[in-house]
Image (tube, rainbow, N blue to C red):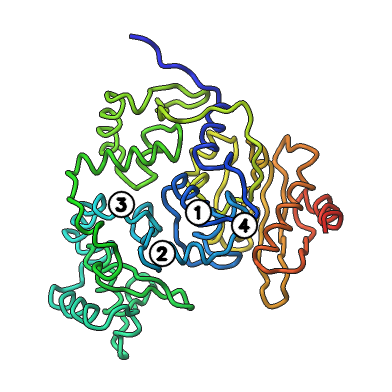
């Protein structure tokens, strides 16, 4: 039996960077075509409510496209014909609308489980709320509450009964997310008024075909990865994903490889590009698909990354909302950032260099911070004296500014 070819760690991470869109050119004025190209790289955009800098689903687009009008994403998500829709695709995430039928088996599994976290939604309540959405949609949970009870024994979420019913219906695919209001509250509607009719008319693939499609898309977005990497992208079980991987290997779409330093077998997508160099420069959201699988990030880049939002302030190592800084094909630093919108200041609460970071790191990071501040509409950058990169970054910001 022929041994699988071996990739160096540097080759593997360059493949991953190209697959994620970090070799694509940034445009002065990104268009919907640019957006579509970028979404084809990431596959999904994770949604998160934390807004200390910018909401999670906007940041990966900036990291790849540069400064863009966020209206592009809103157009894709809310204007007809919709290109993307929210669902539990990785976790809460925007996904292309053509994945809706692929997710129907997942929706059925949530129906059997009575939702994500609880089983307290009765059929009567679900039917009543669904009828209200059909009659009144798009609606928020608050629109349906009318001062309804809010139990306090469900882990502190304190969700109303209407909110739980809406979430259950959403996970089952009986309602879809039509958009969000200015308070980031979800507006629900029936799928017929959210998704294109052509998408809803698509047949439901078999479970096996659905898994293959999700693994295929994960492989395209990763370029190269282990079974665990490919399963995590769309939150499949590793055993479920392995059967799809084996099928794709047999079909020649995935190629077994070994990667330097990786203990587990890896799989290379047949269309993945392997460039000699990658000249990227980007700040990465904690929820960027390049880094959300932390073990993979450590194996690819030698970069140990943990989000510390839920760590008590006194125990945080680097800060509350820390973004890795990608330069070339390496993670060379990290910064704790906050958009102080009241004063118009991008605050760098901490800045740290990775071992072996090149001499140009402060200047390149300063330039990226200037771009980020401009995109966020912030007129000033303030670097606080925390971290081993702070002094050099302060001077670099003055030079760039």
Give residue 321's position: percent from left, percent from top: 60, 59
- Residue to which mark 3 is pinned: 99
Work out how far the residue at label 1 is from the one at label 2, CA to CA, in angstroms: 12 Å
Give residue 146's position: percent from left, percent from top: 30, 90
**SS at mark 1 in the image:** helix
Q: Earlier in the sequence, mark 4 or mark 2?
A: 4
**SS at mark 4 in the image:** loop
Asked if residue 358 is positioned above or below residue 33 in the image, the reply reads above
Proximity of marks 1 and 2: CB atoms separated by less than 8 Å = no
**Looking at the rendered structure, which numbered label has been put on residue 29?**
4
Residue 168 visible to the viewer: no
Q: Earlier in the sequence, mark 2 or mark 3?
A: 2
Give residue 74's position: percent from left, percent from top: 46, 66
**Looking at the rendered structure, which numbered label has been put on residue 35?**
1
User: Viewer-proximal residue, 286 or 306?
Assistant: 286
Q: Residues within 10 Å of mark 1 (few under 14, many from 20)?
A: some
- Residue to which mark 2 is pinned: 77
Residue found 51% across the figure and 44% down from its top: 290
Q: Nearer the viewer, mark 4 or mark 2?
A: 4
Work out how far the residue at label 3 is from the one at label 4, CA to CA, in angstroms: 28 Å
Residue found 58% across the figure and 39% down from its top: 23
- Image quadrant for the C terminus? bottom right
Q: Nearer the viewer, mark 1 or mark 3?
A: 1
């Amino acid at each position: 039996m022929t041994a699988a070819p071996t990739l160096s760690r540097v080759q593997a991470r360059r493949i991953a960077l190209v697959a994620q869109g970090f070799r694509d050119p940034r445009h002065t004025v990104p268009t919907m075509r640019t957006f579509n190209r970028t979404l084809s790289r990431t596959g999904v955009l994770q949604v998160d409510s934390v807004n200390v800098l910018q909401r999670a689903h906007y940041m990966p687009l900036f990291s790849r496209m540069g400064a863009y009008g966020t209206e592009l994403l809103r157009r894709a998500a809310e204007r007809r014909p919709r290109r993307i829709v929210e669902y539990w695709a990785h976790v809460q995430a925007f996904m292309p609308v053509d994945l809706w039928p692929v997710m129907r088996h997942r929706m059925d599994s949530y129906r059997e489980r009575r939702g994500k976290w609880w089983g307290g939604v009765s059929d009567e309540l679900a039917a009543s709320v669904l009828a209200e959405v059909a009659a009144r949609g798009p609606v928020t949970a608050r629109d349906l509450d009318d001062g309804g009870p809010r139990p306090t024994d469900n882990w502190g979420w304190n969700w109303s009964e209407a909110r739980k019913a809406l979430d259950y219906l959403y996970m089952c695919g009986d309602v879809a997310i039509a958009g969000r209001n200015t308070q980031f509250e979800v507006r629900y509607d029936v799928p017929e008024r959210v998704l294109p009719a052509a998408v809803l008319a698509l047949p439901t693939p078999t479970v096996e075909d659905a898994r293959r499609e999700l693994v295929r898309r994960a492989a395209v977005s990763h370029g190269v990865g282990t079974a665990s990497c490919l399963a995590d992208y769309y939150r499949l079980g590793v055993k479920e994903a392995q059967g799809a991987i084996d099928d794709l290997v047999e079909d020649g779409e995935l190629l077994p490889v070994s990667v330097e330093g990786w203990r587990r077998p890896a799989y290379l997508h047949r269309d993945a590009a392997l460039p000699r160099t990658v000249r990227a420069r980007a700040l990465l959201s904690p929820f960027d698909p390049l880094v959300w699988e932390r073990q993979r990030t450590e194996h690819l880049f030698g970069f140990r990354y943990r989000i510390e939002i839920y760590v008590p302030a006194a125990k945080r190592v680097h800060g509350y909302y820390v973004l890795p800084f990608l330069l070339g094909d390496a993670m060379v630093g990290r910064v704790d950032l906050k958009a102080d919108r009241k004063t118009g200041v991008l605050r760098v609460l901490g800045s740290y260099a990775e071992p072996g970071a090149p001499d140009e790191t402060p200047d390149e990071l300063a330039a990226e911070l200037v771009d980020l501040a401009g995109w966020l509409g912030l007129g000033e950058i303030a670097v606080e004296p925390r971290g081993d990169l702070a002094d050099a970054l302060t001077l670099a910001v003055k030079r760039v500014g």
